[in-house]
């Protein structure tokens, strides 16, 4: 991908099968998967790790261990993989192999006594790496004899062939022409072709347990074949379905599948209202290849029609925005998104859904406002516990638990309003922990909250498009920031303009814009109106 | 002046004499129309002006963003060649301009720049002769040349008079030497006085000169501005025309670098003169006062404030500038960066020398399409409101339609309420008040524009009399 090359990162997975004749004379078949290192794609990484027996931890000998290194290693260790450390780029003058090897030993605890020193660019140590794989990585476990099951670790949409699915066969055998079923999406498709990657795709007749390959078969929607899902054979599924009770799965899905949960949201609005359709189509096309991208329509008084989009992280959001502007030529306004609130009136008899600040009514004494809360687990090196708790407090989180997984790693559990999470919580978490912390969250319930509608009055007139819903405690802070921004943005007029943020009739923050003293164009001679207005 | 029936009579009399396009029945040019018919000017009396641009300057002043070419001094060896090249191109342009066969009578010629007084007499004469060759010039044509103090001597001034120049525009800007230095002007107060002496000697009682001054300059206090105006009033002879400009700090100029919107003090430490970094721009409040004070003061001394930045003793308004502000005024323009407006077409020449030289010798490419009726209307509103005579709403109604007339009325309402605009209900003439309305002319005109542009019929293309003639 152009973007990949430009930014020097891997966004999409690549796989390859290598036949290697080792020093012991035997020929081994190695299935290699290259994974993205970036934190945003950790789910994809975890699924590809789940498809493997071993992992090569490639550390830059000049940079040493970075945040992402640790995150990936822990993922690998959690999946019970044999991790083989490798030092890369030892040909660089800035390389410090001994220091970095020591760092790996101390931080991760891997034995680096016979760590391979390599340089992919210079071709040094490649054979040593392959040898160490052969020696240290266990072979795939013997097939259980059960029905065909395969773990999807990647997929992409091809214009001619439809969705191409990459998988690792865990049990059984699949043949070209079989009909398959994807357990999570319950979609069924005929397989037109299966094969292996070398790394270019080479068709084969059959794939068995322990092998890694691809298939395609007129699958139109990438959501049918989601990363982490289990592939089974339709006929085996049907056979077993007859034997089991109604809601039991006839074939046990492989563990670890999860719907990708967006971490970061934003609102995307086209600058030109006419581009709305193009934006919708573009998002649809991007989603073909990106099951993690979520979007739904959103309207805003000020911005018109647009979409509320969810991403795995800021890089993901960045990449999508850039692709929309570059590949689809749509100028976008990106906004901070909001959550959906609820208001219960008449002591719970009536419930109003608030998906826009303008819908929020003035609350009477017996009315109750609710906002969605999430349960969040933050995984972090223990030295950042303080910083994280500070962040949690700022965001109105309720600390539930701190658990020490190891003396140096903790899990902090919070219950925190979703509204505080979807803006820049993830970004704040990363920057306060130097990138080492990671978070996972899921929505629990709606809870009572002292929410108010913050109105903005410009020149004593209410501007509904600028209203927002905030917690009463935050109202003054948010109000002050809003007024200050508006003061900068609104042009001067011939009269003084007061800007006020208020809750009902009570003013919580205010600013004013000074009037202009003159507004005249000194010269107006033959050059046309180019300098005017 | 009560117009009433007399107006209608003259109106039809005027109609009988000519076959005019609609604009000639505009009450805006009533005065000149009457005088024209009385003096019996010829039947092809489509009046037009001619602008000629001489781009050379000794250096670029720090506020200037015009299309000029700094040449150092005229004695520089390169200058002669450059001047030759330019003059040849200019003459070529005048000879081959596409409107050669329109029956215009030229009532004003204006040599602007740059510093036209830097051009050699031979150049100016060649251009002069070419203009007379190509155009029908009225015998009482106003012929102006811009001159900077210190760039001409007695001999040159005499030659200019003999050539036919009958009006001078003297670029003074300020009488304060400190300020003149800070602006990068090459002259000082003494040069102004010397220049005036020369002009007086050469033109004597016929001397008809204008002076340019700028208010709101860095380091200019209100007191110093009052002093500037007093200096003007005490000049012998007094200029019978003044162009007073409120300083506009333009991006791309040195002042633009030093003074951005939000700061009033220069923060540059890399300026050539440490003096300048301590000069602050007057506040908006002060600049606004300077404008208002000048208006009152000059009007007291008999000047008519006839346009936002223009003052003249009776009978001495700039004929040339009037063409710019007239309804459907037409003017030819030649030279670097000059913009002409003939037959409703605005043509802007390239602003850099290389581009201009190339443009002149290229065979005529297709002309830009004429001004749309919307642009014509906005233009008329803009220009008329900047003048003391104002905008005739009934004329707008007749020419464009009553909906536009009403839109303008609506747009001007706020201005009228704030006593910045005045609507003479009897004749339907809308003017901006002096000085406050003029001081906020941008705001009022913008509001009127907004009303016009919001009309549903604004974006439809219309045939018939609404297209520019």
Image (cartoon, coloured by chain):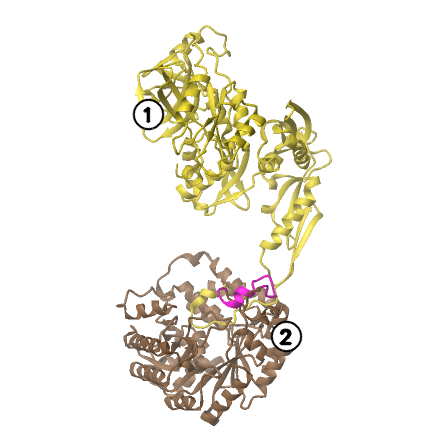
Q: Horizontal placement of A149 versus B187: left or right?
A: left
Determine the secondary structure under disc 1: strand
Q: CA distance from mark 1 to mark 2?
A: 80 Å
Q: Are marks 1 and 2 on the same chain?
A: no
Highlighted magenta segment, given as a residue range: B251-267
**Subunit of mark 1?**
A
| Subunit bearing disc 2 | B
Chain identifier, yellow in the render: A
Q: Quadrant of residue B329?
A: bottom left
Q: Position of residue A481 (x, y in %)?
A: 64, 48
The question of residue B265 being in magenta is answered with: yes
Q: Relative to the observer, which residue lies in front, B108 or A264?
A: A264
Question: Does residue B363 sit above or below B163 in this rendering?
Answer: above
Q: Position of residue A224 (x, y in %)?
A: 42, 24
Answer above or below: position of A347 versus B96: above
Viewer-closest of B39 and A33? A33
Could you tell me residue B369's position as x and y percent? 33, 64
**SS for tag 2?**
loop
Near mark 2 (Cα within 10 A), the count class, few <14, some 14-19 or many ≥20, is some
Label 1 vs label 2, nearer the camera = 1
Q: Give the main secondary structure of the magenta stretch.
A: loop
Q: Colour of chain B?
A: brown
Residue A167 sits in quarter: top left
Say how many tags the image has.
2
Q: Quadrant of the N terminus of chain A?
A: top left
Seen as rendered, the residue at the extreme right is A365
Q: Which mark is residue A15?
A: none
- Image coordinates of residue B320 in percent, x first then y, are 43, 79
What residue does disc 1 label? A201
Q: Is residue B409 visible?
A: no
Q: Which residue is mark 2?
A: B221
């Amino acid at each position: 991908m152009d973007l990949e090359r430009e930014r020097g990162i891997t966004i999409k997975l690549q796989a390859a099968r290598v036949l290697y004749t080792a020093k012991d004379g035997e020929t081994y078949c190695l299935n290699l998967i290259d994974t993205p290192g970036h934190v945003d794609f950790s789910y994809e990484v975890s699924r590809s790790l789940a498809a493997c027996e071993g992992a090569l931890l490639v550390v830059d000998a000049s940079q040493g261990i970075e945040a992402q290194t640790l995150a990936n290693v822990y993922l690998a260790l959690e999946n019970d993989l044999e991790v083989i450390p490798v030092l890369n780029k030892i040909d660089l003058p800035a390389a410090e192999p001994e220091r970095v090897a020591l760092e790996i030993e101390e931080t991760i605890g891997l034995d680096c006594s016979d760590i391979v020193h390599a340089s992919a660019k210079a071709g040094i140590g490649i054979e040593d790496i392959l040898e160490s794989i052969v020696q240290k990585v266990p072979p795939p476990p013997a097939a259980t004899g059960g029905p065909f099951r395969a773990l999807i670790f990647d997929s992409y949409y091809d214009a001619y062939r439809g969705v191409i699915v990459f998988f690792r066969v865990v049990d059984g055998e699949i043949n070209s022409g079989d009909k398959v079923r994807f357990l999570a999406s319950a979609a069924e498709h005929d397989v037109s072709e299966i094969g292996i990657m070398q790394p270019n795709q080479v068709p084969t007749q059959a794939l068995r347990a322990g092998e890694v390959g691809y298939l395609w078969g007129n699958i139109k929607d990438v959501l049918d074949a989601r990363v982490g899902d289990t592939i089974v054979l339709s006929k085996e599924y049907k056979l077993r379905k007859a034997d089991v009770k109604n809601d039991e799965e006839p074939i046990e899905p492989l563990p670890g599948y999860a719907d990708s949960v967006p971490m970061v949201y934003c609102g995307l609005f086209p600058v030109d209202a006419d581009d709305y359709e193009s934006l919708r189509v573009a998002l649809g096309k991007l989603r073909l290849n990106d099951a993690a991208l979520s979007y739904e329509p959103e309207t805003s008084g000020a911005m018109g029609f647009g979409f509320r989009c969810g991403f795995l992280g800021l890089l993901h959001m960045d990449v999508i925005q850039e692709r929309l502007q570059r590949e689809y030529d749509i100028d976008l306004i990106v906004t901070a998104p909001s959550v959906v609130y609820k208001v219960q009136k008449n002591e719970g008899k009536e419930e109003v859904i608030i998906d826009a600040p303008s819908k929020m009514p003035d609350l009477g004494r017996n009315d109750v406002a609710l906002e969605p809360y999430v349960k969040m687990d933050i995984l972090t090196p223990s030295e950042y516990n303080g910083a994280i708790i500070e962040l949690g407090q700022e965001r109105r989180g309720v600390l539930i638990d701190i658990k020490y997984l190891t003396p140096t790693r903790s899990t902090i559990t919070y219950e925190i309003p979703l509204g505080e999470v979807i803006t820049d919580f993830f970004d704040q978490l990363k920057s306060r922990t130097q990138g080492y912390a990671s978070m996972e969250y899921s929505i629990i319930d709606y809870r009572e909250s002292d929410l108010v509608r913050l109105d903005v009055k410009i020149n004593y007139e209410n501007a509904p498009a600028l209203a927002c819903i905030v917690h009463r405690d935050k109202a003054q802070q948010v109000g002050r920031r809003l007024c200050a921004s508006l003061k900068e943005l609104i042009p001067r007029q011939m009269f003084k303009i007061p800007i006020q943020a208020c809750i009902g009739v009570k003013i919580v923050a205010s600013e004013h814009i000074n009037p202009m003293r003159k507004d005249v164009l000194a010269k107006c001679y033959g050059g046309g109106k180019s300098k005017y207005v | 002046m009560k117009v009433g029936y007399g107006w209608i009579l003259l109106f039809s009399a005027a109609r009988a004499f000519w076959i005019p396009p609609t604009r000639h029945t505009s009450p805006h040019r009533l005065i000149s129309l009457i005088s024209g018919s009385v003096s019996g000017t010829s039947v092809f009396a489509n009046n037009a002006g001619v602008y000629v641009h001489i781009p050379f300057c000794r250096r670029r002043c720090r506020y200037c963003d015009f299309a000029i070419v700094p040449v150092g001094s005229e004695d520089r060896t390169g200058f002669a060649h450059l001047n030759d090249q330019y003059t040849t191109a200019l003459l070529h342009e005048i000879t081959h301009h596409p409107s050669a066969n329109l029956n215009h009578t030229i009532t004003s010629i204006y040599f602007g720049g740059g510093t036209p007084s830097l051009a050699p007499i031979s150049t100016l004469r060649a251009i002069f002769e070419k203009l007379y060759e190509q155009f029908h010039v009225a015998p009482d044509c106003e012929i102006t040349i811009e001159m900077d103090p210190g760039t001409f001597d007695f001999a040159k001034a005499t030659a200019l008079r003999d050539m036919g120049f009958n009006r001078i525009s003297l670029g003074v800007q300020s009488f304060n030497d400190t300020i003149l230095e800070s602006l990068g002007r090459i002259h000082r107060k003494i040069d102004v006085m010397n220049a005036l002496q020369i002009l007086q000697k050469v033109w004597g009682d016929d001397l008809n000169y204008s002076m340019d001054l700028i208010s709101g300059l860095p380091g200019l206090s209100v007191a110093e501005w009052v002093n500037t105006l007093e200096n003007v009033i005490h000049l012998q002879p007094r200029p019978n025309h003044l162009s007073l400009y409120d300083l506009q700090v333009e991006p791309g100029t040195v002042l633009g670098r030093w003074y951005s919107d939000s700061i009033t003090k220069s923060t540059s430490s890399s300026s050539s003169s440490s003096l300048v970094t301590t000069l602050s721009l007057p506040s908006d409040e002060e600049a606004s006062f300077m404008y208002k004070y000048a208006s009152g003061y000059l009007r007291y001394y008999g000047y008519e404030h006839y346009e936002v930045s223009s003052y003249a003793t009776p009978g001495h308004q700039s004929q040339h500038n009037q063409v710019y502000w007239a309804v459907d005024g037409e003017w030819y323009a030649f030279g670097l960066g000059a913009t002409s407006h003939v037959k409703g077409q605005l043509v802007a020449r390239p602003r850099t020398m290389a581009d201009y030289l190339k443009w002149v010798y290229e065979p005529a490419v297709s002309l830009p399409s004429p001004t749309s009726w919307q642009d014509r209307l906005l233009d008329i509103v803009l220009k008329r409101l900047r003048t003391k005579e104002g905008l005739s709403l009934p004329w707008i109604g007749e020419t464009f339609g009553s909906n536009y007339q009403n839109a303008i009325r609506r747009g001007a309402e706020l201005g009228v309420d704030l006593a910045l605009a005045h609507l003479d209900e009897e004749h339907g003439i809308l003017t901006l008040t002096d000085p406050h309305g003029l001081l906020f002319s941008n705001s009022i005109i913008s509001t009127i524009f907004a009303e016009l542009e919001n009309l549903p019929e604004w974006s439809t293309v219309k045939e018939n009399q609404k297209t520019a003639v």
